[in-house]
Image (cartoon, grey):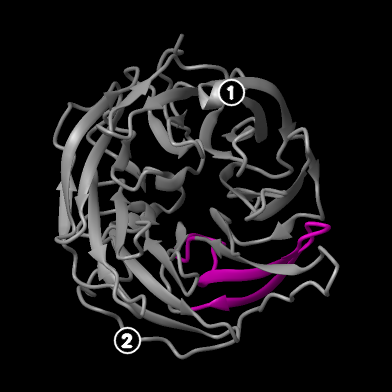
Amino acid sequence: MNAAPRPRPALPSRRSLLGGLLAGAALAAAPALATPARATARPTATPAPPGSPRATRPLLLGTYTSAEGGGTGIGTATYDTATGTITPGPVITGVENPSYLALHPSGATVYAVAEQDAGAVTAVALAPDGTYEVLGTRPTGGSGPTHLSVHPSGHWLLSANYTSGSVAVHPIAEDGSLGERTDLVTHSSPPPGPGQNGPHAHQIVTAPDGGHVLAVDLGTDTVHTYRLDESAGTLTEVSRAALAPGSGPRHLTFHPGGRFAYLACELDNTTVVCAYDPGSGALTPGVGQSTGSDTGYPAQLVVTGDGSYAYLANRGPNSLARYAVEDGGAVLRLLDTVPVGGDWPRQLALSPDSSLLFAANQRSSTVTAFRVGPDGSLAPAGGPLPAPVAVCVLPLP
């Protein structure tokens, strides 16, 4: 059963850490495209020699530029595919409060939220020679955006405004830059859940079938399913899934098979397996289950590329829960938990081949890496990378 609702964490969460951040700095007066930044160097990947599986691959790191001890833009690094050792690189400057990052399917552009009162999204072109160019910034029409994703078509950027409880759509041009917003939908119903003061859209993601867009709202304990008009860039709601009152759904991850999804529920410390119908877009949640800890604030689940294992970041206990995925994705079976090696694991990411797992640890300002074994086991790989207020890690192909 779902546990009783618990109060939000008193120590630095996304909202409390920044203090004056959501009071509005930076892009409040930037409704149009910002001036492109001068290109500068960033680390480039080193290909593996013929016959060798070893190589270095790039990582991008999200932070808060307005937080005490935060970063100065999007951090860059490389990791060794054999050892997991992470080596820091220069910073992509000219990007405000990039607390979440998403890569275009082409690999040529990365997008970042600007998590602040005047919410915005920024496009950054990544050249093969290691240079970058900030292509510009567009307002999301809401406040406190916490998540963004690129539609599989590569033509639309989707973003979720936590503080204002809304989701936005921006067109993506051929060069990766962003156009004016084409839609903004505010979650005006259902009413807020226990202890909430309104809707709080925490995530927006496209289902594997490409036909539906799902928005997770922590404030109303609801997952909204939309159909995206790929000509107009507008969202039409087609279904809603109600979670247990006070559960606080935060982040949804699909199984590669496309028929099941897994929710990390922040406030009642559970994970939920959901059935998904690609035809209707309907999501049917199951019963909340253990995160492997009696206390904690689950942040995010990730699933290996072959769909065999899932991992959960649990803040508070600072652990990673390992699940076996069974029955074609219909079952998560908790196997064990391991220490994350940092404080407050905010976000997880698997390397493109699922051989390494990375955790962005917000309070310890570190990124830790783990080798994923054939049985899904996790073994620390390399040492922690110091990274100021690390809240997002994005391994690039």
- Above or below for 277 versus 6: below
Q: Are marks 1 and 2 in contact (CB under 8 Å)?
A: no
Q: Is residue 112 left or right of residue 72?
A: left
Q: Position of residue 88 (x, y in %)?
A: 70, 70
**Residue 123 falls within the magenta-colored stretch:** no
Tag 1 secondary structure: loop
Quarter where residue 307 is shown = top right
Q: Measured along the vertical axis of the image, is residue 86 above or below residue 288?
A: below
Q: Residue at x 23, y 58 (%)?
A: 169
Answer with mark 1 or mark 2, whichever residue precedes in sequence: 2
x, y percent for residue 120: 30, 64
- Report the magenta residues as a range: 64-93
**Is residue 70 covered in magenta?**
yes
What residue does disc 2 label? 35
Is 21 above or below relative to 350?
Answer: below
Pinpoint residue 206: horizontal percent, then vertical percent: 35, 47
What amino acid is labelled 2 in the image? Thr
Residue that extends furthest to the bottom in the rendered view of this protein: 38
Whole-Å distance between the Cαs marked 1 and 2?
A: 45 Å
Q: Quadrant of residue 217?
A: top left
Q: Which mark is residue 291?
A: 1
Q: Secondary structure at mark 2?
A: loop
